[in-house]
Amino acid sequence: MAERPAGTGKPRGNLPPLELYVPEPRYRPGDPVDYSHLQIPEAGRQPRPDEACEPGETHPLCTDMIRVLDGEYRAVGPWDPRLDPETLRRMLRVMALTRAFDDRMYRAQRQGKTSFYMKCTGEEATSVASAFALADDDMVFPSYRQQGILISRGYPLVEMVNQIYSNRADKLKGRQLPIMYSARDFSFFSISGNLATQLPQAAGWAMASASKGDTRIAAGWVGEGASAEGDFHSALTFAAVYNAPVIFNLVNNQYAISSFSGFAGAERTTFAARAIGYGIAGLRVDGNDALAVHAAVQWAANRARSNMGPTLIEHFTYRAEAHSTSDDPSAYRSAHEREEWPLGDPVTRLKRHLIALGEWSREAHDEMDREVAEEVKAAAKEAEKSGILGHGLHHPFHTMFEDVFEELPWHLEEQAEQAIRERRIKWPDWDGR
Amino acid sequence: MSVEESPVSLSDAPTRRLNMIEAINDALDIMLERDPNVVIMGEDVGYFGGVFRCTAGLQEKYGKARVFDTPISEGGIIGVAVGMGAYGLRPVPEIQFADYIYPGLDQLISEAARLRYRSAGEFVAPMTVRAPFGGGIFGGQTHSQSPEALFTHVAGLKTVVPSTPHDAKGLLIAAIEDNDPVIFFEPKRIYNGPFDGYYDRPAKTWDHHPGSEVPEGYYSLPLGKARLVREGSAMTVLAYGTMIRVAEAVLAEKGVDAEVIDLRTLVPIDIEAVEKSVEKTGKCLVIHEATRTSGFGAELVALVQERCFYHLEAPIERVTGFDTPYPHSLEWAYFPGPVRIGEAVDRLIAAG
């Protein structure tokens, strides 16, 4: 038995022993779900401070929730972004296209055409409505579930599928895990796969833009789980210190794989409330309300663009499906959670808003769903011509050694020769590609 | 020609005598002047000019947007530098001591080092991370480390260590111009003067060392090229940074005609210079100040063994720091000084 360390000698009397608290989610598989503890404020009731306000004026909004669409799917209150019906229809279409893309790529993974996929079902508004609120050349530093941004910006679906299939047309030369896109021409930063690293990078890009007198701003995305990383803290610190023109979008989809948001601190306060400690603007928004998301990001973008500094936005949403194709949520959470989620589905809510406006119909929506499914199907077929994962149509062999450095140093040249020799031994008829 | 035979033959410009701090300051000044995308940031580097004075006067000259202080956040400093690089800047972050670099490792290893690869060249991280390293200044276990092997192990990073003011300037300029991330370790024991390893003798300044003849203006020394410090035939000594002058002094005291190669760049290493010398001398001594196990010396020994085995007349000798943290009161017991090097030299002389 280890000796007790020397102490102050103060008697402990009959104090109770200390207890370690380990968070536990409310529901596990099979449990009935009751969301009455969630405070969902009435839409339209949240004040909209001036974009140039002191950060402190936004802080009550960090524990509130900005909502625009009411129970009848009408846009109400000061945060209504007053988008014209054509913009709303385009936004709806991109969200539907994103969902259709996810569905097809999920099936493609199950069919063995690639190794991995991640859907964003239920979270489409957090990326699509955000992208609609930004300028197309604002630099985004996404995490791994923001495919909606690329689709919003018109990035070719076939390029996305090429990347997912790691085929010979993949612009990333088959080096990255599927969905870790990079699209410089679309101001979309290379997705890391390590979490939260993109946030200080977004702050740095924004600082650079400001130092050059540019007008472009940066926006980063991170999950609530990864907000526990040190990079989240350094990003917000740097952004606050240098008043960087950057938006930090924290997508609170309630889950980090199987770990509920309590393991990132959600039982103590909101994630938006992190902004208060840094003295920057913070907003908490109904992430399944595309209009509210658009309004919040537009507010933050206007603020950043007028040198008023960074904003942290918590998008309160729900990850409706698995973390990835490697995950099975039925093993750790109740299936009723999705059914009972009080903020509904972002695509359905926007659709019903347009119908309520008299600018859309169920028939038009069904037709659109058919169109986007066809669009995705055509892109997938086109991409398959350049190959699927593991079927030989990858990039030329020597590209494996390129881009480690700008120029190939001697040791990589030697290693490339070794790799090529191995290949010739294994496949004597190999054509060198 | 794979080695630079004379440190001053590279530039016809008139020279000034500078210590290593002044030479680094001069390089930074020149690059800030030449390239409007170069920015310098780090803890205390702005108004104050850095705890070692390497950035003295630069904020005043180039303004706060080009040279500025940062929060105490090495992870943030490197992460921000990656974002700045993606924008098109060429950041030169200073990490106040190499011992403090670890919070920035994820951003260096997972981000900066692999950005070009993972984006197939769409994005790059052209940064030069400067950090004073090494011991012999009574810095204790948090101001004395030599963590170069952690970086040489990472695909996509270049690691550079100068050993003279002349080299520090030329190599730093080359590092800043390089489009890949470069870790630039500055041996702080020799910032103010060359160190011969005899801590109990009076400290010297750079005033009488030819390596302090620093050409004025712009010049760069190619990364990946070693410097032939001294020609010889008895053995090849592979070293870098502080240990170059220590090795020279030991060899001079012993009267051993060794060939001394200053590697200058650890990755990519100048393998031609190493092979050519070991093939000539048939014996090899590897020296570094860092801890021994899995140190860069292990890589050097492996390379020499693989490539020069049939020229070797004796086992390769490896002299390093010990596998302990750098102790404060016993730092000279840790330091691979003249006695430890001398023993290895004697063994090599006796062998074969």
Image (tube, coloured by chain):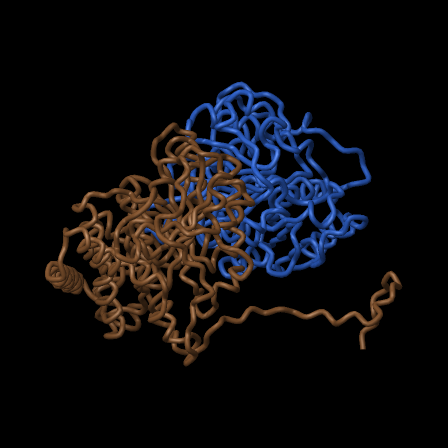
Chain colours: A brown, B blue
Q: State whether residue A334 is above or below residue B3.
A: below
Decide which of A75, A262 is in the foreground and name it. A75
Q: Which residue of the protein is positioned furthest toward the right in this rendering?
A: A9
- Quadrant where the image shows the N terminus of chain B: top left
- Quadrant where the image shows the C terminus of chain B: bottom right
Residue B157 x/y as whole percent: 47, 49
How many labels, in total? 0
Residue B310: tell me if it is visible: no
Determine whether, in the image, residue B233 is placed left or right of residue A164: right
Decide which of B89, B177 is in the foreground and name it. B89
Decide which of B311, A388 is in the foreground and name it. A388
Residue at x-position 54% and y-position 23%: B215
Determine whether, in the image, residue B147 is placed left or right of residue A349: right
Residue B342 x/y as whole percent: 73, 50
Decide which of B338, A298 is in the foreground and name it. A298
Residue B105: tell me if it is visible: yes
Determine whether, in the image, residue A9 is placed left or right of residue B54: right
Quadrant hosting residue B211: top right
Residue B209 x/y as whole percent: 66, 29
Residue A324 x/y as whole percent: 35, 68
Quadrant hosting residue A416: bottom left
Residue at x-position 15% and y-position 62%: A369
Residue at x-position 41% and y-position 38%: A49
